[in-house]
Image (spheres, rainbow, N blue to C red):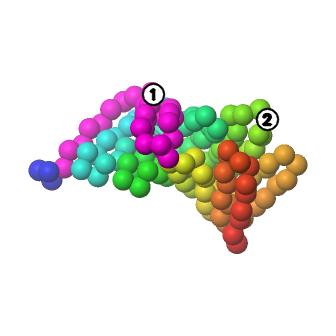
Amino acid sequence: MKNKHLIIISIFLFTLDVSSNNLINHIKIKSDKVEFIKNLRNVSFFSNVNINSSYVEISANSAIYDQIKEVISITGDPSSIRSNKKNNFFDGEAETILFFSDEKVHLVGNASIKFDNISISSNLIIFNPKTGKITSDN
C-alpha cells in the first residue's frame, strides 16, 4: 500500500481534455464523488454520473475513465444514452456502456436503442453517434 496513491474528491464537475488527434477533444463528467488512483491511471466517478460530449449525453450510477485504454466504462441500472444533436436523434439504454476515445459506443447487456423510427434490442449494440451506423450481436 505504500506505493498506492488515492485521492478522494467530492466534486460536481470534472473535465477531461485530451490532446491526441483520435481522442475525444472535450467531454464533461459530473458526479457526486470522484476517486483518482494515480498508479492505475484511472478516475472513478460515483453517484449521479452525467457525461456530456459533442454527440452524446450519458446518465449512470458510476463510471471509470481508463487513461491507458482510453475508454470510459459506464454502469447503471440501466445506464442511458441520448443524442446531443437535433439532426441525429437517438435514445438508448444498457447495463453497461463503453464510450471509446473515438466516441464509438458499445451498449452491453439488455441493450436497446431507438434511432429515427427504428428500435433495436440486443445483448450488444455497437453504435457510432457521428455516422449513425448501428450493429448488434445476439
Q: Secondary structure at mark 1?
A: loop
Quarter of the rendering occupied by the C terminus: bottom right
Residue pointed to by mark 2: 87
Q: Residue furthest front?
A: 21
The kind of secondary structure element at disc 2 is loop
**Distance (Cα) linking label 1 and label 2:** 27 Å
What is the x, y in percent for residue 60?
A: 56, 43
Residue 95 visible in the snapshot: no
Q: Which is nearer the N-term, disc 1 or disc 2?
A: 1
Q: Which residue is mark 1?
A: 13
Q: Is residue 109 left or right of residue 133?
A: left
Q: Quadrant of residue 85?
A: top right
Name the disc covering residue 108, or none: none
Q: What range of the chain is rendered magenta? A: 4-29
- Closer to the camera, 93 or 48? 93
Three-letter amino acid code at disc 2?
A: Asn
